[in-house]
């Protein structure tokens, strides 16, 4: 027999708890002649059994029910499910903490955060010490704070020697130009990359062109291409279409989010496959002041071309470009932002071929190369998606006139 203090010591509980258990009828004492409570070996074991049940996460009430009657399977199953959910949640918290400490990638977290709070996410990345350029590339490419630099090095290594960073063609650019009545003045190309479109625009128009990109390396490739074009045109015995002149193209390394230009400086702003970087809605609004009255904006953007995409492709773009919209809803956004849609067409297969064929060849060449980051795997996945599902989505060119 045990006195209450002895029982309390054996089960590592307080006297008050034991008295409470007794009140619930979980244990029962006998009064000794001196009035002290005494408990049996059976009571000790009941408390130990109770503790074992509590270790399964059951509440005291549930434990009591288990002790007094047959186990209620339904209730236990429910309890198990709640526990599994708690564990999954705790596991997520653990993963997040460990990735914040640099022990693993935060990919899923970045992807999910970007879907629900894109601006706050970008802001937070900059608070963590990333420049705006790095933060934007992290958001769209690496999605990994801890391995971002390695990812970007490998991404640039894959794209080295490839001129197009997205689908485009001279044919599609000329098509857009044909619906713009303004033929001279100033044209700004935003996100000009390595300059394939910049050079095509210089060849086929009279505009003084400014190419803007925030990547020095891309701009240096553009300069090199310009140099090659000039010497090609000089040595050609054929009459050139119209040589692009270096004087006609000015290059500026700056961010599309903070451009060093005057109000109403440009007759035309042109941006292929780049507006999504800061968000199409924001681009439409923040670029507007730089366009002259009666000026034009030409943008291309990835859009859904079907209302019922296959699950796999829908999920892929939901992760990679959560803001991707249908043509109709982009047009609505454009009109709401104060532009009139002058022309809108889906980029041709030739535009995709210009981009995908060299990239596919490069990826095949690098098949045996060892990559540390996910840059190569991500590109392979994207190429597979294009191969299987291109047509359910595509790039749409929008030729827009500023509404007065
Ligand atoms: C998808 S690529 C398109 C490039 C080019 N228009 C083409 O079709 O090949 C996006 C381009 O935007 C540039 N870029 C990314 N963030 C930028 C920013 N904040 N400001 C200016 N350019 C940016 C990249 O360096 C890259 O050249």
Image (spheres, helix red, strand yellow):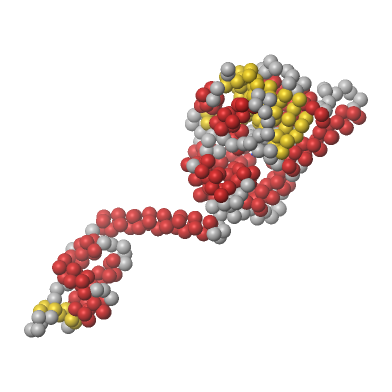
- Tell me how many marks there are: 0
Q: Nearer the viewer, residue 95 or 33?
A: 33
- Name the spot of residue 98 as percent of width and height, x first: 51, 59
Question: Measured from the top left, where is residue 61 in percent x and y?
Answer: 22, 61
Question: Which quadrant of the rendered structure holds the C terminus?
Answer: top right
Side of 65 where 372 appears, left or right: right
Give 347 or 3, whichever is nearer the viewer.
Answer: 3
Question: Who is closer to the viewer here, 258 or 199?
Answer: 258
Q: Is residue 278 visible?
A: yes
Q: Is residue 270 visible?
A: no
Measuring from the top left, give residue 88's x and y in whole percent.
Answer: 42, 55
Q: Quadrant of residue 290?
A: top right
Furthest-front residue in view?
262
**Which residue is painted at 34% across and 55% down in the image?**
81
Residue at left 53%, top 56%?
100
**Residue ID at (52%, 41%):** 118
Question: Is 109 drawn above or below residue 12 in the view shown?
Answer: above
Left or right relative to 14: residue 166? right
Could you say which quadrant of the image residue 342 lies in? top right
Q: Nearer the viewer, residue 315 or 73?
A: 315
Residue 348 drawn at (x, y percent): 66, 27
**Residue drawn at the location 26% of the way across and 62% of the way down:** 59
Q: Taking 183 as reference, is 229 left or right?
A: right
């Amino acid at each position: 027999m045990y006195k209450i203090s002895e029982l309390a010591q054996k089960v590592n509980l307080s006297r008050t708890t034991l008295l409470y258990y007794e009140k619930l009828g979980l244990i029962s004492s006998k009064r000794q002649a001196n009035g002290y409570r005494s408990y049996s070996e059976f009571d000790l074991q009941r408390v130990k059994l109770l503790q074992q049940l509590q270790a399964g996460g059951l509440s005291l009430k549930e434990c009591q029910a288990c002790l007094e009657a047959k186990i209620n399977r339904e209730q236990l199953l429910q309890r198990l499910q709640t526990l599994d959910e708690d564990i999954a949640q705790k596991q997520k918290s653990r993963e997040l903490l460990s990735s914040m400490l640099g022990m693993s990638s935060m990919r899923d977290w970045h992807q999910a955060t970007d879907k629900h709070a894109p601006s706050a996410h970008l802001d937070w990345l900059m608070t963590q010490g990333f420049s705006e350029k790095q933060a934007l590339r992290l958001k769209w490419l690496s999605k990994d704070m801890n391995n971002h630099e390695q990812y970007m090095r490998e991404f640039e290594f894959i794209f080295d020697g490839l001129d197009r960073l997205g689908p485009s063609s001279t044919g599609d650019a000329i098509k857009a130009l044909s619906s713009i009545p303004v033929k001279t003045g100033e044209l700004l190309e935003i996100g000009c990359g390595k300059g394939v479109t910049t050079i095509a625009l210089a060849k086929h128009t009279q505009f003084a062109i400014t190419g803007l990109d925030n990547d020095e390396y891309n701009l240096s490739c553009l300069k090199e291409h310009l140099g090659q074009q000039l010497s090609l045109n000089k040595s050609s015995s054929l009459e050139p279409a119209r040589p692009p002149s270096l004087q006609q193209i000015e290059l500026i390394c700056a961010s599309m989010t903070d451009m060093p230009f005057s109000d109403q400086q440009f007759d035309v702003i042109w941006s292929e496959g780049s507006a999504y970087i800061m968000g199409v809605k924001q681009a439409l609004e923040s670029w507007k002041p730089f366009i002259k009255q009666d000026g034009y904006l030409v943008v291309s953007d990835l859009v859904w071309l079907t209302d019922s995409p296959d699950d796999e492709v829908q999920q892929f773009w939901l992760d990679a470009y959560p803001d991707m919209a249908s043509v109709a809803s982009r047009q609505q956004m454009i009109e709401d932002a104060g532009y009139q849609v002058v022309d809108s067409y889906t980029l041709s297969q030739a535009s995709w071929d210009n981009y995908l064929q060299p990239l596919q060849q490069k990826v095949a060449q690098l098949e045996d190369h060892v990559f540390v980051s996910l840059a190569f795997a991500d590109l392979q996945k994207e190429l597979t998606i294009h191969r299987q599902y291109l047509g359910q989505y595509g790039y749409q060119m929008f030729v827009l006139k500023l509404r007065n």
